[in-house]
Each structure stands twice: as C-alpha cells, then as structure tokens.
Amino acid sequence: MNRTIPPPIKDAVEFDIKLKPYEKFTLDNGIPVYVIKSEEQDTLQLELIFPAGSWYESESLEAAATNFLMKNGTSKRTALEINEAIDYHGAYLNRNAYHENATFTLHCLTKHTEVLLPVLQDVILDPVFPEEELQLYKQNQKQKLAVNLQKCDFVANRFIDKYLFGEFHPYGRVSSMMAYDALQTETLHAFYQKHYTYNNCRIFVAGNMPANMLELLNKHFGSTRWNGETSHTRLDLPVQPAEEKKFRIFNDENGVQGAIRIARPFPNRYHPDFPKMLVLNTILGGYFGSRLMSNIREEKGYTYGIYSQLYNFRQVSAINIQTEAGRDVCEATIEEVYKELQRLQNEAVPQEELDLVRNYMIGSILGDLDGAFQLIQRWKNLILNDLDENYFYNNIQTIKSVTAEELQHLAKQYLTPGDFYELVVI
C-alpha cells in the first residue's frame, strides 16, 4: 500500500443502502413486538405506542394531559417513588403525545431491565391520576403557556397551523388557559380506559436485550387483556384552511425581531410527489447550504437561520418556511423568499447543486441508520404509517434519480408564491 496516494473518494449516492430487517414476535395476548438486536452496548430502548394522540380527543388537551399524568401516580407508587425508582438505576422514561399516537419510551442499562419493567407496568396498567397532580399540572402548564405567548416564534407556530388546517382540526387546535382549567380527573381516566388498551398497544425494542426479554414482556404486558378491548376508526376530519392568506400580528411592542412563517398545504407522504418534493425542499431550505440560507443569511444578513420543511402528518402535509428576522427587514425577507421560489420555477437546478444535495440526503440517511436505536425509529415510522421497506427503497431511488426537469415541474406546481399563507408576528 502506497500511503502517499489518498484513497479514492466515494460519494454517498454510490452506496447500496440496506435497511436491516427487524424481528417480530407476538405476546400471548396478541401484542406485536418489533425488535432490532444489537450487542454493541449494554443499553436498551423499549417503546410502547398507542393510538392516543390529539386526533382522538373529545375535549381539548385531554390526550397530552392523560399521557403526562399516567407517570404521576399509581395505586402502588407515588410520582416521587416512580421517578426515584427510574433515576436510581440511571434510566429515564419519556412520554409524549403527538397528533396520532402517544408513546412511553424507557432507556436503561440492559442489566436493569428486569427491575424497571414492573415500574413501567404500573405506569401503563395502573395510573390513578391523583387530583393534586392534575392541579399541579394545570398550574405548571398555564405558567408555561403564559411565558410562551410572549414569544413571537411560539405564537407564529400556533397561528400558522390554525391557518393551514383550521382551528377545530387536530393539526390546527392549540392550547388555552380555559382548556387547561376544564381538565378533569374523570375525563382523563375515561380517555385512558378507551385508548390505552392491550389490543391498541405496539411495542418496539432495540439494543442489547436480556436473554429472557420476551418472557419478561409476556409477564408484564402479555399475560392479560388489560383494560379490555376497544377499536378505533380513524375519522376523516375536514381540513378548513383560512380564507385570507396574509397576516400581520403584533405580539410584543418591545420586541426587536419578528417571526416569519410562509406555508401552504401539501399532500401527505402517500402521494407520489412527496419523495421528489423532499429533494426540492432540501434545495430550497432543508439544510445549511440551502438557497434560502445562502441568500437570506449569508448574503443579506437578515437572519441567523432560515429553513423550510415538509410536515409528515398522517392525513395531510404542508410546506413551511420559517425564520426570525429583525423587525425592519421582515418584509424584505419575505420578498427574498418569494424570489427563491420563483427562481426554482424559472430555472432548472444546476447539476452540480443537485449532486451535492443528493449526497447530503443519502449521507443523512446513512447516519440515521447507524445503530439499533436509529434503525428501530426508521422501522417504527414505516410500520405506524402502514408502509413497508419498499417505501424506504423507493425514496432512496427517487433521491438518486430525480431530474432537474422534474424538480422544476414540481416547483411550478407547488411553489407559486400566491398559494402560500404569509404570517409575520412582531
């Protein structure tokens, strides 16, 4: 080997990416378990997922409140005892409620799995929603909301979603002081009983599992039909976007900058244009070297950062361009955004830029597949959206093969400035 000669550079697009398959098991009561094994480190990630997001609410905020307070007291353990049991073993238990799903995720050392699973079982199967914990939750959330409502970017995020989807749609609904005040223990318990049931549960496990992992899962989650059996039909709720498209909101008279949101509805991930649009969005504002960043941050100096993104919601998606800029340059920033949209419509993307973005996107995917925890997240997104590995490979192929002409056609179809909602909060 001649070490004076550097090895040849291999572009990311030249790699043949393979998605490592998962193993699937079924507990005695029918709960599916998806597993990615790895012995690189003695750590484990265990995630339980339920259809218990805001989509299924009958009263505002009940999904998030139920998810949060399940960890704050059972018939056997107080909130303090639950947290101490988890912290003592150097573990942490996250819970989150999204639009469609709610999750509980345990991260721990493999050797502590057997000790921690009974605690997780209590949280999932035996929450009691103590009244004092609910009152504390209301107080804390209202204080956070009061502080956040003084921030222009927080207010902008609330309003743009309402304009895109409608204030009564789960994607556009926002929190309020009145909604927090209206939360009741009985309401949360009823929501829990309906949505956190054995037949609605799916389990994802990644990492170095103990040899008796399936036996432990069966013992704590698979031996009974806990909470009974319920079924849920996904409602096709109507999206009701705002009729007007240009908004200016004055939120902080002493503020020095404004929050800008330029967004429009877009089909969801099942639409054939979605994978190609991911490439176009990356060119526009999806990474640090994007056109929006090069123009508005690097050349004009209007902002520290500007990005565009595609929402990955289940029912409908959206293209959202967001930034914060000085009050005196907010309107100029919007003008430059529209210039970049029109440039993508009028000029084909140069091959050199397209190749750079291809390599960036494939490289990012390679990074996302590095390790069992990242792999299980990729599979989870596919499984929860009723997709398989073909969707993943088709997206890879689209990134590698989409042409500048196809991207220009997409830009003409989806990046017309007049189709966007325009919001500035100052």
Image: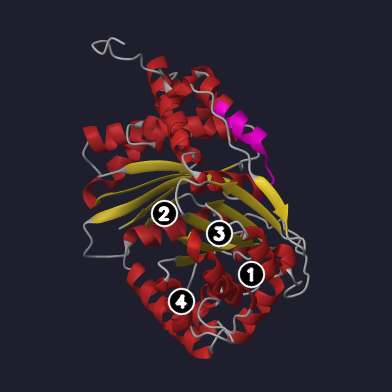
Amino acid of disc 3 = Leu
Q: Is residue 132 magenta?
A: no
Dot 1 or dot 4: first in sequence order is 1
Q: Position of residue 342 (x, y in %)?
A: 42, 28
- Distance Cα–Cα, label 1 vs label 3: 26 Å
Q: Can the viewer see residue 240?
A: no
What range is drawn magenta here? 384-396
Dot 2 or dot 1: first in sequence order is 1
Q: What label does residue 247 carry, if any?
A: 2
Residue occupied by mark 4: 85
Residue 83, by quadrant, is bottom left
Residue occupied by mark 3: 46
Badge nearest the viewer, 2 or 4: 4
Amino acid of disc 2 = Phe
- Residue at 53% x, 65% y is 113
Name the main secondary structure of what is drawn in magenta.
Answer: helix
Q: Quadrant of the N terminus?
A: top left
Residues marked 3 and 4 touching at CB (< 8 Å):
no
Q: Is residue 237 above or below residue 82?
A: above
Residue occupied by mark 1: 57
- Distance Cα–Cα, label 2 vs label 3: 44 Å
Question: Within 10 Å of the Cα at label 3, are there few (<14), some (14-19), or many (20+) other Cα atoms?
Answer: many
Residue extending farthest bottom: 132
- Distance Cα–Cα, label 2 vs label 4: 49 Å
Amino acid of disc 1 = Glu
Amino acid of disc 4 = Ala
Q: How many marks?
A: 4
Q: Name the one closer to the observer, 408 or 72.
A: 72
Q: Viewed as shown, does residue 303 lie left or right of 410? A: left
Badge nearest the viewer, 2 or 3: 3
